Image (cartoon, grey):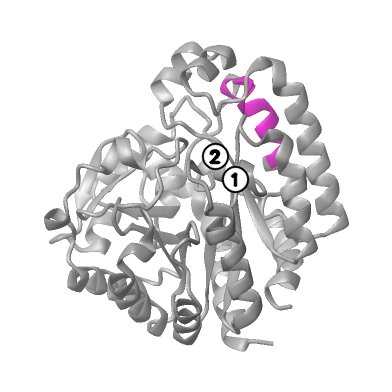
Amino acid sequence: MNIDKLKKLARIGFQKAIMKASLKKDIKTGISRRPPQTVYWIQHTQCNLNCPMCNVPQTTMKQEREDWISTERMVEIVEEMASMGVPNFGVSGGEPLLDVERLFAVLEVASNKGLYTHFGTNGLLMTEDILRRYDNLGVGHISLSIDAIGDVHDKIRGRKGVWENGVVRTLDIFEKVKPRNINLKINSIISDENLEELPELVRFLADRGYVVFLQPFDPCAYDFLTKYKDSAIAHDKFPQWIPPGRLGLLSEVTNRILEIEREFPGTLLNDTRHLEAVKRYFSFDLLDNPAPCTVAFENLWIKPNGNVGYCNYGLVGNLKETSLSELWNCEKMIKTRKAMLKCKFVCLLGCMYSPSIYALFKKGLRTAKKLFK
């Protein structure tokens, strides 16, 4: 058993449980008494694909390279994260592997400081050398995006060959290298484009021992969706949204996926409560009783230019000169947290979904069997 891996994952689980236990009191004040559970860095917005479900090109593509936060400043922020006790650091894009040296310059410091690290990729730029290099840094995982098998995945991603040259090749690389410290996690989006394909995909992954997180499609258009509350209108504007006539199929698909999870325990990072909510998400039933959004008490996102913000709640601050500890409980952050608690749209994003303490430990023990195989 990899003791370093066990220690880092146990630390994340312990701090998550402590944060959940203290959350009720923090909500009253808007002040988070704990450091962020996870800090995400959007390294850049450049990508070698242009997937229709991705909102990054529309929301942040205007950030030019000269506006980016420097690598040296990101290293300083990571060092401060470690001193604050942040356990988890993730990198996204765009496609992080388009600037692999910048990526590893920051990941190396994070890993050396004891943080669990991870980054997302579509797999097209993955190589054996990159995986071995990451494995040598320490404990973490790579999130690979897979939405279906074969040609359907290519169609969803808008480019022929992504399945073979991105997905299959990355899976083969993991099988060949057999990294000791780095795991492979699969991210899949639930949408109208891959609804029929999802059970086959989950079984394909379960048979190979991978873990998968299923994320319902989110167009990041909360004002529009909250105004109309109609899945037919939502589908007309966003073709990935599941329309009324296919909600019954969504229920069948969800049930089949849960059957696969019972057959291969620990395959899904979602628990039953989250997947059951997906059925009501696309029909807008969740809006009748929205749960308070506590994401800003737990996580923090750094955009390429150093800005920190959440959804459509505006700019909290910028980390080019401000320290992370100062920004974490600044007046603007407290106001943002209180505003987000009243958000009328239940997005079911991975950052929004927060399982119970019981579910954390139950799911954690099952998934550990996959992580420590």
> Which amino acid type corresponds to the residue marked 2 in the rendered image?
Ile
Near-viewer residue (352 or 102): 102
Quick check: is 144 in the magenta stretch?
no
In this image, 94 relative to 118: left or right? left
On the image, the x and y values in percent for residue 329 come to 29, 53
Q: Amino acid at mark 1?
A: His
Secondary structure at badge 1 equals helix
Looking at the rendering, the stretch of residues picked out in magenta corresponds to 275-287
Tag 2 residue: 156
Q: CA distance from mark 1 to mark 2?
A: 5 Å
Q: Quadrant of residue 56?
A: top left
Residue 13 can be seen, yes or no: no
Residue 298 in the image, given as x and y percentages of width and height: 44, 53
**Prevailing SS of the magenta stretch:** helix
Q: Front-most of 266 and 174? A: 174
Quarter of the image for the C terminus: give it. Answer: bottom right
Residue at the image position 26 percent from the left and 36 percent from the top: 314
